[in-house]
Image (cartoon, rainbow, N blue to C red):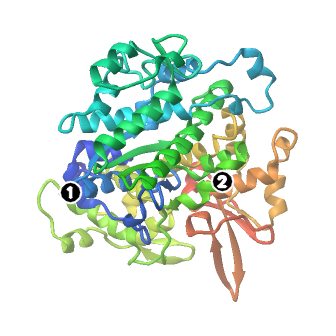
Amino acid sequence: MRMSKFNFGEYDGRQEYLRGEDYFLNSFMLPPNFNTSNISNNKKFIIVGHKGVGKSSVQLYMERLRREEGYLTDFLSFYDDLSPNDYLEFSKTQRISFVEVANAADATALYDFREVWVRIILKKIAELLDRDFPSSFTRLMNRSHSGSKSLVDGIAAGLRIKGDFKLIFGDIGIDYDFSKLSDAGVMPLSDFNELALKLLLESHAGAMIFYSIDELVVSNFETKSDEFKVRMAIIRDVIKSSNKLNNFFVKNGMDINVVCSLRPEVRDILYNLDSDISKFLDSCYTSVDWNAVEDMHHPLVEVLFRKVQFGSPTEMSREHVEAMFVGSMDFTKERVPIPLFLLRQSWHRPRDVVRFLKCYAEKNGGDESFNEDGVKKMLDDYSRISARECFDEISVKYSQETTMKIRNLIRKNYFSTYDEFISAFSVLENKIDLEELANDLFNAGVIYNVDRVDNKNRYFAAHRGVDRLFKDMGIFVHQGLWHYFAIRHRS
């Protein structure tokens, strides 16, 4: 069977799920040490992992599990489902002057989107319940907006919500003291949310709901500085609002769960922006990673075989799949099987597997096996796409111009000392903190440490679970990027 005939999945788990649920489920594998029973409102509700590690896929898989258990489920992609206009509408809910923003040491502290997100999530919950379980709660939420597609529809400046509340409350049968309001058509959003939660508890105490908010990410590649601040404030308050709601559900014995996912570099920015967030975030997140011994039993080798087996247009046995990987490759002075070569060229992420398969099929569409010549043909494309993903991770801290300069300054694959590596970026020392840059490149997977003991190299990399760059060891540029930097033979 020619490679061009296979479906090797999608880089994005959500897109793969939407395009072929059966393929997604057949080829999916939970990361080692990830326990789905820990994801709930009273344990862990934040999933943290690097780009491409499978956060979206884990959430989608858990949605499927929960639906089979009788839960109502829904999924919001922060990256895909929030439009540029939504960000503008979010800003309009705040009463902040341009002078305040310009003079603030930290503009994100001026923004408060917590009640906005509580209302958004409650509205989504109402939509799930309304079809089969209409109630005073669902009627309130359905009548508190104008019907536009904006997530913040109905919310006015100053964190207020608009509506003909005398009529709405009268029709629903809600007793409310309107003397508290200066205008019966405008209500503080916090009061509205408090009332909505009361009705949710009264009407749906036994509801089982699993609601996911995916990919809380922001990138300087696509944002200007003011928008970056707004987005970071929005992300911060998604986390805070989810925590508030989960606490309410746990306190009242409700099986409604709000789950979020974010990248570690975004989590670290949140720590710097708001020290209070660490008080609950540290105890409420679980990590997704694929740390395991690099051999043919590594779980990502299993993912590789599944992607091929279930991507075939005709039924294919596991034995046939394994036989398609022919021969071996040179890697650091030894010959290794092609699946193991891929593993060592990867960052231990399922997206690396998909990238390898897609690049191989693009360059070798007529091949019926994975072989050494075919792998060599696709390494340039694989390295180029891998580099883009790595640098996307550090783009939350560095401008596009600075990121391009950093790329251009990596001109060899090995640095015998930390100081030698730092000196390669000396032209940037007046613009950025070079030690911080080295740590960021390590965490993004661009570089890792190497130490030689008893004539054997020992490697210390972020994707292997190491949490920091060591200054007393040599530094390697990740082999998966050598073709991109054109440094295969430059040490």
Q: Position of residue 212 (x, y in %)?
A: 39, 46
Classify 10 Å Cα crowding around label 2: few (below 14), some (14-19), many (20 and above): some
* Residue drawn where x is 71% and y is 51% of the image: 411
Q: Amino acid under label 2?
A: Ser
Q: Quadrant of the C terminus?
A: bottom right
Q: Quadrant of residue 328?
A: bottom left
| In contact (CB < 8 Å): disc 2 and disc 1 | no
Name the mark on residue 278. Answer: 2
Regarding mark 2 in the picture, which secondary structure is present there? helix
Task: Identify the residue at image location x=47%, y=77%.
Answer: 335
Residue at 50% over, 54% down:
46
Residue 190, given in percent of the width and then of the height, sits at: 53, 30
The residues bearing labels 2 and 1 have C-alpha atoms spaced at a distance of: 34 Å
92 and 490: which is toward the camera: 92
Judging depth in this view, the residue of 372 and 436 nearest the camera is: 436
Q: Amino acid at mark 1?
A: Glu
The residue beneath circle 1 is 68
Query: What SS does tag 1 mark?
Result: helix
